[in-house]
């Protein structure tokens, strides 16, 4: 691809693990296990194509209401994946970041996340962002609360707050908004994900279930993006 058409930030809603497992007569966890392979493949493809930020919606605030056995298995899978991918991230110059309501995660998982974030902090080739225990409404609400506290004694200052100022209170502060949002499995909704940040994002919906979404499908999405005409509400 022409470097001028490669999106700077690609975000993916990884959907379809459960259905993929059901089609094979397996438990949902089997789908999540195979979905990890797609994470690795798409991360490699993003690095190869020159994407600077790749973000993945791994676990939403709403997902906490799933059966306890599935939630526990997902958290264990995250722990194992973090340990296994350290060398790969370092070898490929990938910085690892986790964003979301981390107060709901176990101390053990938070410690592993912090250790990997610290170890990869100096990597500059690409940033891999995992949204864990995240929702768009929660992000906007926590930003609004932080803003209200900041200006509690300065109501006149609050009147001068602009959009870019509000951006700095979101958990994504310092990270560019997604240029391209991919959702797999055929569903066409954003499921309470990056509600503020995707105001002018290009959307790409794939019928492929996440465990089958590998480099070929990722590059297909990039090619589709390269043909979009992004005007941001303006006229060229």
Image (tube, rainbow, N blue to C red):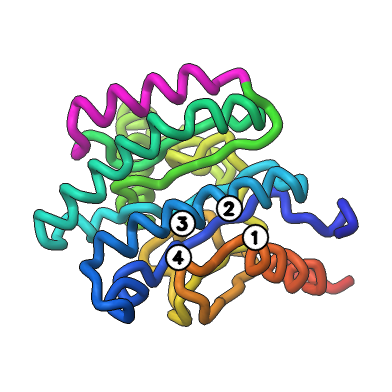
Q: Which mark is residue 41?
A: 2
Real-space Cα separation, disc 4 to disc 3, in angstroms: 23 Å
What residue is disc 3 on?
A: 194
First-in-chain label (3 vs 1): 3
First-in-chain label (1 vs 2): 2
Q: Are marks 1 and 2 in contact (CB under 8 Å)?
A: yes
Seen at 71% across and 64% down, the residue is 219
Quadrant where the image shows the N terminus: bottom right
Seen at 29% across and 22% down, the residue is 111
Q: Which residues are magenta?
A: 104-122
Q: Secondary structure at mark 2?
A: helix
Q: Nearer the viewer, residue 196 or 84?
A: 84
Q: Are marks 2 and 3 in contact (CB under 8 Å)?
A: no
What residue is disc 1 on?
A: 215
Q: Are marks 4 and 3 in contact (CB under 8 Å)?
A: no
Q: How many marks?
A: 4
Q: Secondary structure at mark 1?
A: helix
Q: Secondary structure at mark 4?
A: helix
Q: Locate residue 127, reporting x and y percent.
A: 60, 36
Q: Locate residue 199, reporting x and y percent.
A: 57, 63
Real-space Cα separation, disc 1 to disc 4, in angstroms: 12 Å
Real-space Cα separation, disc 2 to disc 4, in angstroms: 10 Å
Q: Which mark is residue 211?
A: 4
Q: Locate residue 235, reporting x and y percent.
A: 84, 73
């Amino acid at each position: 691809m022409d470097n001028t058409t490669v999106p700077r930030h690609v975000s993916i809603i990884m959907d379809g693990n459960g259905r993929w497992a059901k089609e094979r007569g397996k438990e949902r966890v089997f789908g999540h296990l195979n979905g990890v392979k797609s994470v690795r493949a798409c991360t490699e493809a993003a690095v190869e194509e020159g994407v600077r930020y790749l973000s993945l919606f791994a676990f939403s605030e709403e997902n906490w209401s799933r059966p306890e056995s599935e939630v526990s298995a997902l958290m264990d899978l995250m722990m194992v994946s973090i340990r296994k991918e350290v060398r790969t991230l370092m070898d490929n110059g990938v910085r690892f970041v986790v964003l979301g309501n981390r107060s709901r995660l176990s101390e053990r998982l938070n410690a592993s996340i912090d250790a990997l974030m610290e170890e990869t902090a100096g990597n500059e080739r690409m940033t891999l962002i995992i949204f864990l225990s995240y929702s768009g409404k929660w992000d906007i609400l926590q930003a609004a609360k932080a803003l209200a506290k900041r200006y509690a004694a300065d109501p006149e200052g609050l009147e001068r707050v602009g959009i870019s100022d509000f951006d700095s209170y979101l958990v994504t502060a310092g990270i560019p908004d997604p240029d391209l949002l991919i959702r797999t499995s055929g569903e066409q909704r954003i499921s309470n994900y990056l509600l503020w940040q995707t105001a002018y994002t290009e959307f790409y919906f794939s019928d492929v279930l996440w465990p089958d979404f590998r480099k070929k499908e990722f590059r297909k999405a990039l090619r589709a993006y390269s043909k979009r005409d992004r005007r941001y509400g303006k006229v060229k």
